Image: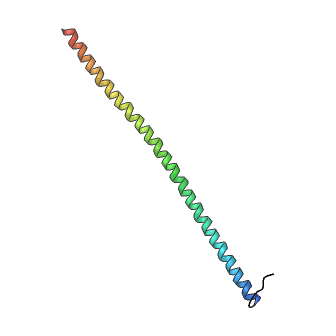
Amino acid sequence: MPEVLGSSEDTLRALIREYLFISLFRACAESLASENASRLAAMERAGKNIEETLNDLQGAFHRLRQGSIDEELFDVFSGFEALSKRG
């Protein structure tokens, strides 16, 4: 058994004070950890959404670009055929 120097009542008060401090500290630490985990999850979801949106926009851009290229090619071919029929 450990020996207590001084009065038992003072030692008990000190132990209770330390126990309360540690309990409050642990609660605050768990609260901060939970908040940070929540923020990290939200940031990961936002990053995933950004990637999906970027992929969608790139696909739309490529479709529009290809449509524009096709339209110009059709115009060139139509012009060539029109000039070929004249001669």
Q: Residue furthest left?
A: 87
Residue at 68%, 76% in the rendered image: 20
Residue 1 vertical position relative to residue 76 in the rendered view, above or below: below
Image coords of residue 63 (percent x, y): 39, 31
Residue at 49%, 49% in the rendered image: 46
Q: Residue furthest bottom?
A: 6
Q: Quadrant of residue 12?
A: bottom right
Residue 11 vertical position relative to residue 26 in the rendered view, above or below: below
Residue 86 vertical position relative to residue 40 in the rendered view, above or below: above
Image coords of residue 83 (percent x, y): 20, 13
Residue at 53%, 53% in the rendered image: 42
Image coords of residue 87 (percent x, y): 18, 8
Q: Relative to residue 3, is residue 61 drawn left or right? A: left
Q: How many marks?
A: 0
Residue at 65%, 76% in the rendered image: 21
Identify the image's colour scheme: rainbow, by chain, secondary structure or one colour: rainbow
Q: Relative to residue 56, is residue 28 drawn left or right? A: right
Q: Relative to residue 51, is residue 74 drawn left or right? A: left
Q: Quadrant of the N terminus?
A: bottom right
